[in-house]
């Protein structure tokens, strides 16, 4: 049985800041799906170009934030923009995507999961079918993206111990 879920409301937050100073393995078999990340980045940029928007640069720091979140959701068995401890997605991303030295900082996030897996084209189509997710994909303010798809052989909690692929896309823009 194939199941797909997309968060009903894409998370988006704009925060103005005053300038101031691989692979994940576990008992559950959580591993990065690098090929999906690369293909999804290419398709996302093709979509943006087709809409007259600048392509997004893949950011190592946003990718690290996205990977931490996808991995945590797969291991703990929840699906939310918030972290398992209740912290907001913007707080989580700020630990990786620094605000230091920037006048303004804004981030957004799209999530989805599928069982047993999902391809890049299907992920993009699911997000495009959801107005808030579509708005994130086509937001002209974004300059960078971090993508992280992970696959768990047996994801607990909301995933029912089924094989599951979870994708996090973290979008960002910073201005000096």
Image (cartoon, rainbow, N blue to C red):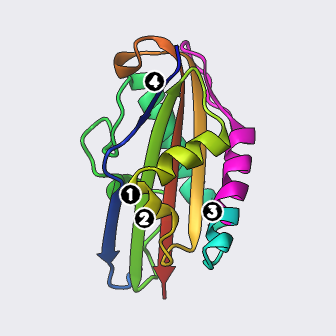
Helix, strand or loop under label 2: helix
C-alpha separation, residue under disc 2 versus residue under disc 1: 6 Å
Residue 131's label in the rendered image is 1
Vertical order, 36 against 145 (above or below): above
- Please indicate, yes or no, whether residue 83 appears anywhere in the rendered image: yes
Estimate the x, y position of residue 105 in percent, counting from the top left: 41, 75
Which residue was labeled with disc 4? 75
Helix, strand or loop under label 4: helix
Estimate the x, y position of residue 161 in percent, counting from the top left: 45, 11
Residue 59's label in the rendered image is 3
Q: Earlier in the sequence, mark 1 or mark 3?
A: 3
Nearer the viewer's eye, disc 3 or disc 2?
Answer: 2
**Marks 2 & 1, CB-CB < 8 Å contact:** yes
**Marks 3 & 2, CB-CB < 8 Å contact:** no
Vertical order, 142 against 36 (above or below): below
Nearer the viewer's eye, disc 1 or disc 3?
Answer: 1
Helix, strand or loop under label 3: loop
C-alpha separation, residue under disc 3 versus residue under disc 2: 20 Å
Q: Residue at x 40, y 13 (%)?
A: 160
Residue 135's label in the rendered image is 2
> Residue 86 or 81: which is nearer the viewer?
81
Q: Earlier in the sequence, mark 3 or mark 2?
A: 3
Estimate the x, y position of residue 124 in percent, counting from the top left: 58, 49
Region of the chain picked out in magenta, as a range: 23-45
Helix, strand or loop under label 1: helix
C-alpha separation, residue under disc 3 versus residue under disc 4: 24 Å
């Amino acid at each position: 049985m194939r199941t797909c879920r997309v968060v009903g409301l894409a998370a988006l937050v704009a925060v103005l800041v005053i300038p101031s100073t691989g692979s994940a393995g576990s008992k559950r078999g959580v591993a990065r799906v690098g090929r999906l990340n690369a293909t999804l980045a290419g398709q996302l940029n093709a979509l943006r170009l087709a809409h007259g928007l600048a392509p997004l640069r893949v950011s190592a720091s946003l990718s690290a934030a996205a990977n931490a979140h996808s991995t945590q959701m797969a291991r703990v068995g929840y699906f939310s923009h918030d972290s398992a401890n209740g912290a907001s997605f913007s707080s989580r991303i700020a630990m990786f995507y620094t605000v230091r030295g920037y006048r303004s900082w804004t981030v957004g996030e799209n999530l989805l999961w599928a069982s047993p897996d999902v391809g890049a084209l299907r992920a993009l189509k699911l997000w495009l079918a959801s107005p808030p997710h579509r708005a994130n994909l086509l937001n002209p303010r974004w300059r960078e993206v971090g993508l992280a798809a992970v696959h768990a052989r047996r994801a607990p909690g909301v995933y029912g111990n089924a094989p599951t692929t979870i994708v996090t896309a973290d979008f960002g823009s910073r201005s000096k």
